């Protein structure tokens, strides 16, 4: 097993780098675009500051549901022409980042929308009564009162997409999951399988631990 | 103690109406109703659950928009203002709530500072007002504590400090003591009466507790089925005999053991036991 480890070390390092690259891209896209989308869906829901934009709310909700209905592997294949346009290629970690980002954006939008619902209506109303604009409500109330939930939402997102990134192996995406599939599964190299799984477990545990620690720290409720 | 001769009222509702169904499906709307509260008055609104008291109060700062009628606060018809104009006007209309509605991730001082930060006041002025208002409600020592570590009464004091910080003309109070025990209620009523005396802030208060109205208010409007059915002056905590409110008091006072409605026992008794709504 040690020999295998030594032999495979360059592969493992490369795979880890690829995983981090895919995660970095798709998490960034999700945080920025998915966060904004989730916020808008929340704000345009009934009774909220932008509740009059009901059409947007219905449309955005519909789109989020449609994208989230796709099994990831189908999405990956279905949007490959789009991937080729954006990434210039349809194979490799950069190409895999395109479908990963799309899935992550809509996944995170839903997570954010649901997290913001936990902010008590009365607190938002108090801010409205103070003369807060919708943007001020976001900045001074929603992001403040929901912050520990938001940290946990990012944690769930990161763990889910670490797992999704393994599927990217189908398009030669690389990454730790891909390594597990290529060596461990197709070649029956159980030791490689074990190494990658230990690595993935360690990653998930770290993400989860860090997320929970941070969420507790910012929660003063 | 008639104040009807005062010039422009601080709050004036002219023929406002609002159809409104609460989450429980109960109709708690307001029929076409008018109300004028002179500057400096503490005016109570009392009535049974579903009478439309809270809806009426929330019409004053347009948390509920009236279907018809005018809402004039400090000489300005709020229903005619733009969104930005309304926000500007709301900066000078304080509000406190049954469940306090403080931000739990902010400290006490940050909570009190919030309305002034929203209106873009300079930092030095905010600091000065926060200190003054926390001092006024007796919580200067708790400035850096988070609300989660305060008692209900202290939370409502913070909410009062927060509402007073921008020096409002008008303070709206929606069942401010209904989540508090009788002794804390009395303390809080003292704070509100003090705010009225010292800063001249006009207070419009909704309560279903007769004691609260009796001890605090100069004048009371009685609501039933979305309409104000009676208005009374309250001098020295006396509800005039022969009034509808006096009748209620006699009826419900009898159940608590006191046979005659006068003199009114100081122990608070509830006109209506309302379940706390979220």
Image: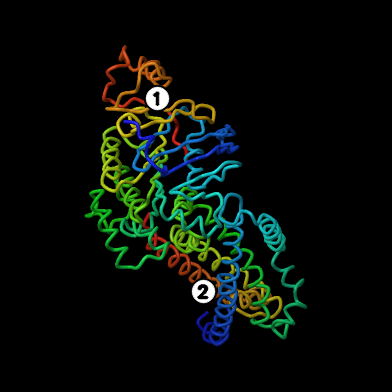
Q: Which image quarter is the N terminus of chain B in?
A: top left
Q: Which residue is mark 1?
A: B271
Provide the chain ID for the residue under circle 1. B
Provide the chain ID for the residue under circle 2. A
Q: Of the residues tagged 2 and 1, which is closer to the observer?
A: 1
Residue B210, picture quadrant: top left
Q: Is residue B169 left or right of residue A150?
A: left
Q: Is residue B64 left or right of residue B183?
A: right
Residue A64, picture quadrant: bottom right
* Horizontal and vertical percent position of residue A66: 72, 60
Q: Is residue B41 left or right of residue A189?
A: left
Q: Residue furthest top?
A: B259
Label drawn at residue A199:
2
Residue at screen point 29% across, 27% down: B237
Label drawn at residue A182:
none
Foreground residue among B115 and A28: B115
Q: How far apart are the two marked residues, 2 and 1, measured between alpha carbons?
A: 66 Å
Label 2 crowd (10 A; few <14 / some 14-19 / many >=20):
some
Label 1 crowd (10 A; few <14 / some 14-19 / many >=20):
some
Residue B270 vertical position relative to residue B84 in the rendered view, above or below: above
Residue B225, picture quadrant: top right
> On the same chain: label 2 and label 1?
no
Colour setup of the view: rainbow
Foreground residue among A196 and B7: B7
Q: Is label 1 in a helix, a strand or a loop?
A: loop
């Amino acid at each position: 097993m040690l020999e295998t480890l030594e032999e495979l070390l360059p592969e493992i390092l490369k795979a880890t780098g690829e995983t981090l690259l895919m995660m970095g891209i798709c998490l960034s896209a999700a945080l920025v675009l998915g966060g904004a989308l989730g916020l808008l869906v929340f704000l345009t829901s009934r009774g909220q500051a932008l509740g009059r934009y009901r059409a947007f709310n219905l449309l955005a909700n519909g789109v989020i549901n449609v994208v989230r209905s796709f099994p990831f592997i189908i999405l990956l294949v279905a949007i490959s022409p789009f991937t080729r346009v954006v990434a210039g290629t349809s194979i490799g970690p950069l190409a895999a980042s395109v479908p990963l980002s799309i899935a992550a954006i809509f996944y995170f939008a839903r997570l954010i929308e649901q997290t913001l619902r936990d902010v008590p209506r009365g607190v938002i109303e108090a801010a409205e009564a103070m003369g807060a604009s919708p943007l001020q409500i976001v900045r001074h109330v929603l992001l403040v009162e929901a912050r520990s939930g938001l940290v946990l939402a990012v944690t769930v997102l990161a763990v889910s997409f670490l797992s999704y990134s393994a599927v990217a192996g189908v398009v030669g995406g690389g990454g730790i999951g891909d390594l597990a599939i290529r060596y461990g599964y197709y070649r029956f190299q159980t030791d490689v399988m074990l190494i990658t799984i230990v690595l993935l477990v360690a990653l998930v545990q770290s993400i989860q631990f860090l997320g929970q620690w941070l969420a507790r720290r910012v929660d003063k409720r | 103690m008639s104040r009807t001769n005062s010039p422009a009222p601080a709050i004036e509702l002219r023929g406002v109406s609002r159809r409104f169904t609460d989450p429980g499906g109960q109709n708690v709307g307001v029929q076409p109703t008018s109300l004028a509260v002179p500057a400096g008055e503490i005016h109570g609104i009392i009535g049974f659950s579903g009478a439309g008291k809270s809806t009426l109060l929330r019409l004053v700062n347009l948390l509920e928009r009236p279907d018809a009628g005018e809402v004039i606060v400090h000489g300005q018809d709020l229903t005619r203002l733009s969104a930005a104009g309304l926000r500007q006007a709301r900066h000078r209309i304080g509000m406190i709530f049954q469940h306090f509605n403080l931000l739990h991730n902010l400290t006490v001082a940050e909570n009190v500072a919030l309305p002034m930060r929203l209106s873009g006041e300079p930092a030095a002025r905010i600091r000065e007002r926060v200190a003054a208002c926390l001092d006024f409600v007796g919580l200067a020592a708790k400035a850096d504590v988070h609300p989660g570590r305060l008692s209900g009464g202290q939370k409502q004091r913070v909410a009062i400090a927060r509402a007073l910080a921008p020096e409002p003309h008008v303070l709206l109070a929606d069942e401010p003591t209904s989540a508090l025990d009788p002794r804390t209620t009395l303390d809080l009523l003292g704070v509100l009466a003090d705010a009225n005396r010292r800063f001249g802030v006009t207070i419009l208060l909704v309560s279903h507790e007769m004691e609260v109205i009796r001890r605090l208010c100069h004048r009371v409007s009685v609501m039933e089925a979305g309409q104000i059915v009676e208005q009374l002056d309250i001098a020295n905590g006396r509800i005039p005999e022969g009034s509808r409110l006096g009748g209620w008091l006699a009826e419900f006072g009898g159940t608590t053991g006191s046979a005659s409605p006068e003199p009114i026992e100081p122990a608070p008794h509830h006109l209506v036991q309302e379940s706390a709504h979220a």
